[in-house]
Image: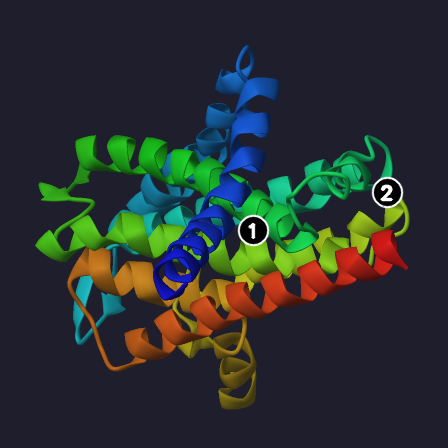
């Protein structure tokens, strides 16, 4: 009896890994004729790069980073990549997830299948990661072509790690977005989400070093998730890593994992109560 039980346990574990992918498959089928709409999300950070990085950057010149100086466009590009991954993940786990939860009743139907609501939550995060990854790939492809003052926008070979770092940023925000959306009751509540995202985008070291802030405000900014993502990707793309990138990785991984747990439990409370 031991061998059959072991085989059954392995099959059960395999099923738990596969079940969330059915959500990804379902969403892919829904978007199969409009996939370009998802991919087009990388244009926003590209426009910021062209206007701020190259336009304003021509007036600013070089900025301090890692004990040296880099062109302003080189400073801004990693932050826009982090913001791009954030936007892709948040959009999927906020508006789209809320529609499927509240109006399409997708997860009510899932209850009648072998999938659990935890599987559904994991599947939505996987889908959000896919969307954020498409944004990141598109933006990185463009950044790899551009240069400024004879210097590439990705001056370090460590820049190859920027893509997995962007996926980690997407995971952190996907988990957080999914958890927050389970508390949303109406569309207007998303105004509060935007009220949080916009200041993070503007003040998380995206367009200038946070050294410009008073020490107390610097500490506050360093505790925000987008700053951790910006710091991580900027350190990799510019080749200026420090001990803080370990904190970035742990912070974003824990944020995503905790968000997934909260979202799973909240879905069970809303749909199984």
Q: Is residue 93 visible?
A: yes
Where residue 230 sits, quadrant-wise, is: bottom left
Q: Residue lying at the far top in this picture: please name it.
A: 33
User: In front here: 252 or 3?
Assistant: 3
Q: Is residue 79 visible?
A: no
Badge 1: how crowded within 10 Å, few (<14), some, or many (20+)? many
Alpha carbon of mark 1 to alpha carbon of mark 2: how far? 23 Å
Badge 2: how crowded within 10 Å, few (<14), some, or many (20+)? few
Where residue 1 sits, quadrant-wise, is: bottom left
Secondary structure at numbered mark 1: helix
- The residue identified by callout 2 is 187
- The residue identified by callout 1 is 122
Quadrant occupied by the C terminus = bottom right
Secondary structure at numbered mark 2: helix
The residue at 77%/55% (across/down) is 267
**N-terminal of the two: label 1 or label 2?**
1
The residue at 58%/28% (across/down) is 27
Relative image position of residue 59 (x, y in whole percent) = 33, 48
Please state if 32 lies on the left or on the right of 186 as rendered.
left
Relative image position of residue 26 (x, y in whole percent) = 59, 27
Relative image position of residue 125 (x, y in whole percent) = 55, 48
Q: Residue lying at the far bottom in this picture: please name it.
A: 216
Where residue 6 sits, quadrant-wise, is: bottom left
Q: Is residue 199 above or below residue 67?
A: above
Please state if 33 lies on the left or on the right of 2 as rendered.
right
């Amino acid at each position: 009896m031991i061998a059959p039980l072991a085989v059954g346990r392995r099959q059960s574990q395999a099923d738990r890994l596969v079940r969330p992918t059915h959500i990804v498959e379902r969403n892919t089928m829904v978007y199969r004729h409009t996939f370009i709409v998802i991919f087009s999300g990388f244009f926003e950070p590209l426009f910021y790069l062209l206007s701020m990085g190259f336009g304003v950057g021509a007036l600013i010149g070089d900025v301090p980073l890692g004990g040296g100086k880099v062109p302003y466009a080189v400073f801004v590009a990693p932050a826009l990549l982090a913001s791009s991954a954030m936007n892709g993940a948040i959009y999927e786990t906020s508006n789209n997830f809320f529609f499927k939860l509240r109006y399409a009743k997708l997860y009510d139907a899932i209850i009648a299948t072998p999938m659990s609501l935890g599987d559904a939550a994991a599947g939505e995060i996987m889908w959000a990661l896919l969307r954020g990854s498409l944004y990141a790939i598109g933006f990185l492809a463009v950044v790899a072509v551009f240069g400024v003052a004879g210097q590439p926008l990705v001056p370090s070979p460590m820049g190859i790690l920027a893509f997995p770092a962007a996926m980690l940023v997407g995971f952190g925000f996907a988990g957080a977005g999914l958890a927050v959306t389970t508390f949303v009751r109406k569309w207007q509540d998303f105004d509060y989400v935007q009220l949080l995202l916009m200041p993070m985008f503007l003040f998380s070291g995206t367009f200038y070093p946070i050294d410009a802030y008073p020490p107390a405000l610097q500490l506050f900014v360093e505790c925000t998730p987008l700053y951790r993502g910006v710091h991580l990707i900027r350190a990799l793309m510019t080749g200026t890593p420090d001990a803080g990138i370990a904190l970035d990785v742990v912070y974003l991984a824990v944020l995503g994992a905790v968000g997934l747990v909260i979202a799973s439990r909240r879905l069970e409370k809303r749909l199984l109560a």
